[in-house]
Image (cartoon, rainbow, N blue to C red):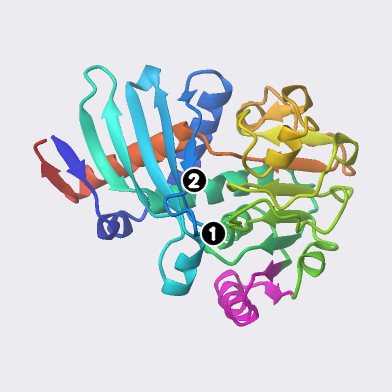
Amino acid sequence: MITILSEDDLHAIALSEPAIRSAVEKGLISQAQGNAIAEPTTLFNPTPDKDDSIAVVKGSLPNEQMAMVKAVGGFPNNTQLGLATNPGCIILMETKTGQITGLLPAACVTTHRTAMVTAIGAVELARDDASVIGCIGTGGIAVQAVHYIASRRKIDQVRLHGRNPENTKAKAELLSSQLGIEVMPTPDWKTCFDGADILIDGTALPQDTQLYPFNEVPAGCVLIVFGAYSALPNLDMSGIDCLIMDRWVQDGRGALGPQMRDGIIQPSNVSAFMGDVLCGKATGRSSKEDRILFCHRGVAACDLYLARELLEQAQNKGLGTNVSF
């Protein structure tokens, strides 16, 4: 029997922030402790003359007898249509017999997982007195990450930058009213990041494009990067005191793709994995002046725990459609 959840079901379930954080933290820790399998992501462009992509993510939690295959799109122009830029679906399977147990939309899970990992990085790695967020990107993931960060630490100001100035201004006004703090729309990357303590690169780039305005991470800051492509210049390790990742992926893609391809960043450069920081096996920040780069590529175990929580909540609330397959 397969439980199918719709977008309406996910909205009705409305997982709480603590539940999302708990699931994501368990996934990060399982990955760091070697209790999760994360296969390399397969990425392809379904239409060669467009800047779109589809990624296939595979992973499992052997001790939990759960596995997942997620097909998720990267369609940047969906913003103009009022649609999620990361549509797709998640297939859940139990590993004893390979039976499919769940089918649910991927966009919600991907958004909350990515935003929560970003927020966890900010909370764990920023200075204790960090109070200004510079956020590039006005889409769901970046803005949701700001919400999660603001709920865990005192933030005095958010600077927001997006491709469309009018949309950025509207998003800034909405975010300010929701958080009750100053949210300032900014005209460019430098204005957004200059003087901020927590720097979030939430762009959905169609290709590697050097947009980051500095040659190194500013002293005392944490720069958080994610996504399929890189906005960074050829930063080398001399401009970084500490590199934290959710997992190492040797595929030359992602926010550190160019640096990996050029051999600038290698496995030996990784100071710690976020799961080890969460469970106290590793230290992120060691001084107020540390320049920290946190890059997350996505951990399938986080998606698995989130999807399982959604299925359990659906069963408790009588939501979803059960079908034989």
Above or below residue 235? Residue 153 is below
- x 9%, y 37%: residue: 324
Task: Determine the image quadrant of residue 161.
Answer: bottom right
Looking at the picture, how far across and down is residue 48, in whole percent? Answer: 48, 53
Q: Is residue 139 left or right of residue 312?
A: right
In the foreground, 132 or 240: 240
Pointer 1 local density, CA inside 10 Å: few below 14, some 14–19, many at least 20: many
Amino acid carrying mark 2 in the image: Arg
| Disc 1 target residue | 144
Task: Determine the image quadrant of residue 91.
Answer: top left
In the foreground, 128 or 115: 115
Task: Determine the image quadrant of residue 7.
Answer: bottom left
- x 43%, y 44%: residue: 19
| Residue numbers of the magenta segment | 159-186
Looking at the picture, how far across and down is residue 167, in whole percent? Answer: 58, 78
Residue 123 colored magenta?
Answer: no
Above or below residue 21? Residue 193 is below
Q: Earlier in the sequence, mark 2 or mark 1?
A: 2
Looking at the picture, how far across and down is residue 162, in whole percent? Answer: 64, 70
Q: Is residue 112 left or right of residue 143?
A: left
Q: Secondary structure at mark 2?
A: helix
Amino acid carrying mark 1 in the image: Gln
Residue 22 visible somewhere in the drawing:
no
- x 55%, y 27%: residue: 29
| Disc 2 target residue | 113
Pointer 2 local density, CA inside 10 Å: few below 14, some 14–19, many at least 20: many
Q: CA distance from mark 2 to mark 1?
A: 10 Å
Above or below residue 47? Residue 42 is above
Point out the residue furthest to the left here: 324
Q: Quadrant of the N terminus?
A: top left
